[in-house]
């Protein structure tokens, strides 16, 4: 590996099908940069998250992405330079620029960009959201930035929902927030449906929002992108809702993360075209 190589990676538990390596290597090629990107699964390495993180810090990584279930666990290890991002309490992008490393949340910025691209003239309205973990926090703050009229949150772990509500209140967002005891209760009054649980991704079959509850709403978003066509989105599309797939969040957060990692702005349209084509041979670590 040359001194000019930009070494990146992803720490997560269920990432064998992640497309992040391909996105960042392709973005590097478009920008004339030599980028490598490694999948780092703590259990497969026989190490805990903190040990893997420390290895990245000491072994020459420029930056790493963090995904489920470590987006909140990483926060105490970081400096969060943007108070608005620090308020979210979850991080998916780390840059090893100094000690402690800098943390960012491109799930937040990526969701806002994905929504505005999909619905340039629409408002979010009242939203029912399943899941208040790391990505749920980012999406909730994104909805606030988008002028969401009211957010109804359900999580099987009530403490997570309460923590998210407290974070939103502490940040003084202008968005009424209500915790509901069931997803059924949330969707009745909703204009939009959001899944921020891992349900529906590879290894977590099913849907967090039952098909019978879908139909009266306007739009749906699923944070899951492996697979892109989840059971939830399939049900929502069949019921006539407008869709934002998890791929759109993945794409926009990746573009933002690449900028943090490299200081370079990739041509988003060119990157999207490359990713839509066949996957080339690349230096992507398993």
Image (tube, rainbow, N blue to C red):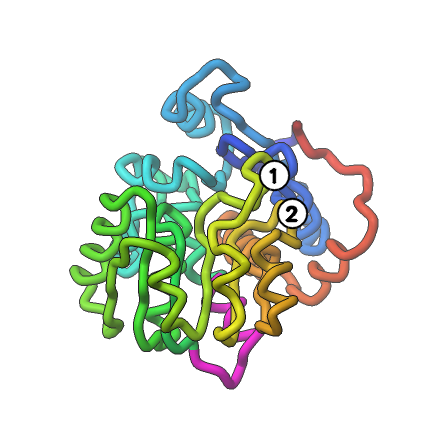
At x 65%, y 47%, the residue is 227
Give me the residue at 43% from left, 46% from top: 92
Which residue shows up at 65% across the image and 31% down it? 2
Residue at point 59%, 68% (across, down): 243
Classify 33 as above or below 122.
above
In this picture, is 118 found above or below 43?
Answer: below
Q: Is residue 139 above or below residue 67?
A: below
Instruction: Return the residue at label 1.
Output: 202
Magenta region: 111-123
Q: Quadrant of the C terminus?
A: top right
Which secondary structure dominates the residues rendered in magenta? Answer: helix
Q: Would you say 107 lies left or right of 22 here?
A: left
Q: Is residue 85 magenta?
A: no
Q: Kindly indicate the quadrant of the structure image that contains residue 73.
A: top left
Q: Is residue 26 left or right of residue 53?
A: right
Residue, disc 2: 227
Q: Position of residue 230 (x, y in %)?
A: 61, 52
Residue ranking furthest to the front? 212
On the image, the x and y values in percent for residue 74 come to: 34, 36
**Residue 184 lies in quadrant:** bottom left
């Amino acid at each position: 590996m040359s001194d000019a190589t930009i070494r990146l990676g992803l720490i997560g538990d269920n990432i064998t099908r992640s497309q992040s390596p391909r996105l960042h290597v392709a973005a590097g090629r478009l920008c004339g940069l030599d980028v490598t990107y490694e999948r780092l699964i703590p259990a497969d390495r026989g190490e805990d998250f903190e040990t893997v993180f420390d290895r990245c810090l000491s072994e020459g990584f420029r930056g790493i992405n963090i995904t489920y279930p470590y987006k909140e666990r990483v926060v105490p290890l970081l400096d969060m330079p943007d108070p608005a991002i620090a308020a979210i309490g979850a991080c998916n992008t780390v840059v090893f620029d100094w000690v402690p490393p800098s943390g960012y949340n491109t799930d937040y910025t990526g969701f806002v960009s994905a929504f505005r691209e999909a619905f340039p003239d629409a408002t979010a309205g009242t939203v029912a959201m399943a899941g208040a973990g790391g990505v749920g926090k980012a999406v909730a703050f994104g909805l606030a930035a988008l002028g969401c009229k009211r957010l109804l949150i359900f999580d099987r772990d009530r403490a997570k929902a309460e923590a998210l509500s407290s974070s939103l209140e502490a940040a003084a967002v202008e968005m009424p927030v209500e915790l509901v005891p069931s997803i059924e209760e949330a969707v009745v009054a909703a204009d939009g449906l959001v899944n921020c649980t891992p349900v529906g991704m590879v290894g977590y079959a099913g849907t967090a929002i039952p098909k019978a509850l879908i139909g009266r709403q306007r739009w749906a978003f699923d944070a899951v992108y492996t697979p892109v066509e989840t059971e939830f989105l399939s049900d929502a599309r069949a019921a006539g809702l407008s869709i934002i797939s998890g791929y759109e969040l993945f794409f926009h957060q990746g573009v933002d993360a690449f900028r943090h990692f490299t200081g370079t702005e990739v041509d988003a349209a060119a990157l999207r075209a490359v990713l839509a084509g066949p996957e080339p041979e690349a230096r992507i670590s398993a």
